[in-house]
């Protein structure tokens, strides 16, 4: 099944989990804007170097740079064949309009913009206690997915750390920023008839089934 989807939701809502399920079961290509930024920066492309300058100064990467980075991946032949699930893009109405133009040029349409919605305190609960491996990036959780050995990764034996972003007050601030910045994007897709609201407070399987129900 070749689908073109957008996942919209706050940190900790499960976008990465759903992207992985869509890829493993339907072959849809996951495209995280954060991952793409990192790859462009590591490869020291012109766009990567430009983005890095903004990030180093704590500034948002301009719409034009973000759009150009994502457009390059969306136009890729493999993406045409497999479809995509976007995570972290579009973040603004201007980016959403640019995505519409890109898909129009490719003679393709967007299947759904899926808003994964959950109570904010549940997000705080999910993210508090999250740990990442300093070597391989594997994610653990002190309650939901603890490592076999305290402080060490099961996969590579690397040390685990808690990101500053995963402290409760920082999480609440990130949620406020998300709500303010993303509400216009949700409204945009609601106005185009592309929006699907999904209750993401349940487990991954139930959330996945909700996503697929209107698409099947």
Image: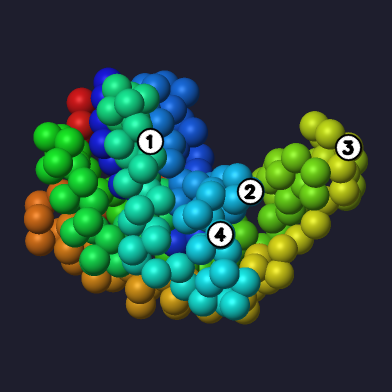
Residue 71 in view here: yes
Tell me how far mark 4 sits from mark 1, CA to CA.
Answer: 37 Å
Q: Assess whether mark 3 and mark 2 are in contact (beta carbons under 8 angstroms).
A: no
Q: Name the residue rendered at 35%, 32% in the picture.
A: 76
Quarter of image, res 208: top left
Q: Specify the label residue 42 is tagged with.
A: 2
Depicted 118 relative to depicted 69: above or below: below
Q: Does the CB distance between marks 1 and 3 fall below 8 Å?
A: no
For the C terminus, give its image quadrant. Answer: top left
Does the residue at mark 2 contact the one at mark 1 (Cβ under 8 Å)? no
Name the residue that disc number 1 marks. Answer: 208
Position of residue 82 measured from the top left corner of the image (x, y, whole percent) = 33, 24
Residue at numbered disc 4: 49
What distance separates the C-alpha of mark 3 from that of mark 4?
32 Å
Where is mark 3, residue-wise? 157
Q: Quick one: label 3, few (<14), some, or many (20+) residues within 10 Å?
A: some
Query: Which percent across, then down, holds residue 191?
Result: 10, 61
Label 4, secondary structure: give it: helix
């Amino acid at each position: 099944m070749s689908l073109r989807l957008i996942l919209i939701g706050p940190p900790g809502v499960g976008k990465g989990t759903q992207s992985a399920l869509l890829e493993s079961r339907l072959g849809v290509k996951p495209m995280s804007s954060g991952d793409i930024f990192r790859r462009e920066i590591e490869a020291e492309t012109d766009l990567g170097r430009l983005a890095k300058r903004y990030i180093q100064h704590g500034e948002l990467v301009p719409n034009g740079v973000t759009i150009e980075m994502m457009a390059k991946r969306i136009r890729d032949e493999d993406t045409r064949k497999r479809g995509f699930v976007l995570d972290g893009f579009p973040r603004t109405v201007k980016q959403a309009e640019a995505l519409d133009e890109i898909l129009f040029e490719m003679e393709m349409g967007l299947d759904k913009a899926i808003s994964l919605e959950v109570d904010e305190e549940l997000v705080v609960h999910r993210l508090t206690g999250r740990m990442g491996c300093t070597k391989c990036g594997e994610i653990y959780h002190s309650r939901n997915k603890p490592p076999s050995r305290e402080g060490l990764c099961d996969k590579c034996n690397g040390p685990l750390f808690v990101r500053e972003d995963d402290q409760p007050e920082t999480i609440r601030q990130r949620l406020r920023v998300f709500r303010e910045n993303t509400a216009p994007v949700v409204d945009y897709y609601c106005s185009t008839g592309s929006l699907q609201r999904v209750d993401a407070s349940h487990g991954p399987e139930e959330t996945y089934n909700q996503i697929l129900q209107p698409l099947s």
